[in-house]
Image (cartoon, rainbow, N blue to C red):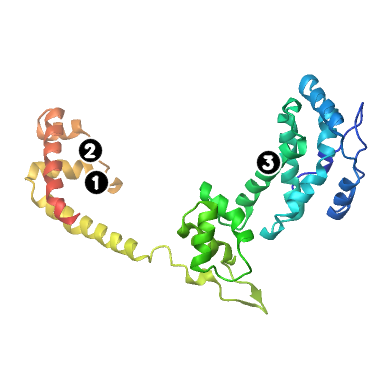
């Protein structure tokens, strides 16, 4: 198993525990081993479930899990068409099985195999949606339904005809355009952005068509407009101010470190012989006037 160690599901022994799985080194050996584990009678299953529910008996839970591992293998095999490792699908299904055992109520008169099926599939579905290709293809409830049912509704690898699209949309209760979109996305191929190096030369790859970070047309236009605003717009707005207002705005907003940095309201108040509050009022009025002048450049 590639993600979690399968020995996490092996009973450690104790009263009522079934035989533990032998040490297995590959998936085929694991599958063979779980198919040799004994199945439970209805009476034994109810007894174990009650012990787990009432006494938190982990040995009882372990026996319930172990006896149903073959079910997980069978369900996971149904999802091999998505190109994900069989071992990983089994791992996720085992997690769903353990969740089912934890929530199973033997008094409802339902066998664990029926109850666990939902949890096993739910966990596998979640794993597939997170890991099938680099881009998640199913986000809404309708898209998830299509994702897991469209393949079984298609007869062959041909593109769906309008009549088939309509029939599938009606059966699954989704929109026709959702069927068409999901078929397109499922039929796409994964491509590497970077080319492979063969014979010392890198092959031409999709990355070659990617735009340079600063050459996208809208970014270029925005940069030009910003430069025009900086040069022409602010210059013209300052020319519209009286000398004192212009001095205050330049000292407060347009000085850099080489000029000694921006000046405070109190420094300008000392320079003009007025209060700091008066400087603030002049500044606010000047900025408002400049804002009106700059409207033509925005």
Task: Name the side, left or right, on which 245 lies relative to 20.
Answer: left
Q: Determine the image quadrant of residue 152.
A: bottom right
**Is disc 2 surrounded by few (<14), some (14 to 19) or many (20+) residues within 10 Å?**
some
Q: Can you give x and y, in whole percent of width and height, for residue 47 in the image?
A: 84, 26
Q: Which residue is mark 3?
A: 118
Q: Secondary structure at mark 3?
A: helix
Determine contact: label 2, label 3, CB under 8 Å: no
Q: Determine the image quadrant of residue 197.
A: bottom right
Task: Name the side, left or right, on which 296 lies relative to 3.
Answer: left
Q: CA distance from mark 1 to mark 3?
A: 68 Å
**Is disc 3 surrounded by few (<14), some (14 to 19) or many (20+) residues within 10 Å?**
few
Q: Secondary structure at mark 1?
A: loop
Could you say which disc has been placed on residue 64 in the image?
Answer: none
Determine contact: label 2, label 1, CB under 8 Å: yes
**Is disc 1 surrounded by few (<14), some (14 to 19) or many (20+) residues within 10 Å?**
some
Q: Is residue 150 visible?
A: yes
Q: Residue furthest top?
A: 54
Task: Name the side, left or right, on which 61 lies relative to 138.
Answer: right
**Which of disc 1 and disc 2 is earlier in sequence?**
1
Q: CA distance from mark 2 to mark 1?
A: 8 Å
Q: CA distance from mark 2 to mark 3?
A: 70 Å
Q: Residue at x 74, y 25 (%)?
A: 107
Q: Which residue is mark 1?
A: 255
Q: Residue at x 15, y 51 (%)?
A: 295
Task: Say if 140 sits above or below 9 in the image.
Answer: below
For marks 1 and 3, give the one nearer the viewer: 3
Q: Nearer the viewer, residue 169 or 287?
A: 169
Q: Quadrant of the C terminus?
A: bottom left
Q: Which residue is mark 2?
A: 263
Q: Secondary structure at mark 2?
A: loop
């Amino acid at each position: 198993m590639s993600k979690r160690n399968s020995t996490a599901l092996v009973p450690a022994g104790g009263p009522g525990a079934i035989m533990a799985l032998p040490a297995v080194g590959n998936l085929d050996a694991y599958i063979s081993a779980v198919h040799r584990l004994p199945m439970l009678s209805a009476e034994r299953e109810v007894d174990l479930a009650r012990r787990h529910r009432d006494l938190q008996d982990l040995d009882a839970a372990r026996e319930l899990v172990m006896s149903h591992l073959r079910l997980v293998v069978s369900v996971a095999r149904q999802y091999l068409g998505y190109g994900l490792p069989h071992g990983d699908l089994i791992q996720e299904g085992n997690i769903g099985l353990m969740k089912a055992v934890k929530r199973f109520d033997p008094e409802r008169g339902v066998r664990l195999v029926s109850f666990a099926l939902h949890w096993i599939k739910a966990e596998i579905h979640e794993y597939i949606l997170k890991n099938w290709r680099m881009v998640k293809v199913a986000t809404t409830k309708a898209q998830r339904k299509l994702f897991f049912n469209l393949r079984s509704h298609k007869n062959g690898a041909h593109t769906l005809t309008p009549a088939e699209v309509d029939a599938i949309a009606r059966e699954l209760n989704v929109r026709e355009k959702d069927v068409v979109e999901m078929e397109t996305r499922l039929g796409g191929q994964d491509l590497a952005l970077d080319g492979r190096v063969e014979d010392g030369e890198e092959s031409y790859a999709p990355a070659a068509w990617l735009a340079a970070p600063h050459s996208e047309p809208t970014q270029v236009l925005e940069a030009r407009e910003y430069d025009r605003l900086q040069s022409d717009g602010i210059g013209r707005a300052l020319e519209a101010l009286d000398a004192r207002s212009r001095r205050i705005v330049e000292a407060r907003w347009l000085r850099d470190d080489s000029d000694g940095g921006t000046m405070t309201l109190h420094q300008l108040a000392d320079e003009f012989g007025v209060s700091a509050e008066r400087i603030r009022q002049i500044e606010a009025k000047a900025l408002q006037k400049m804002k009106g002048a700059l409207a033509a450049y925005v």
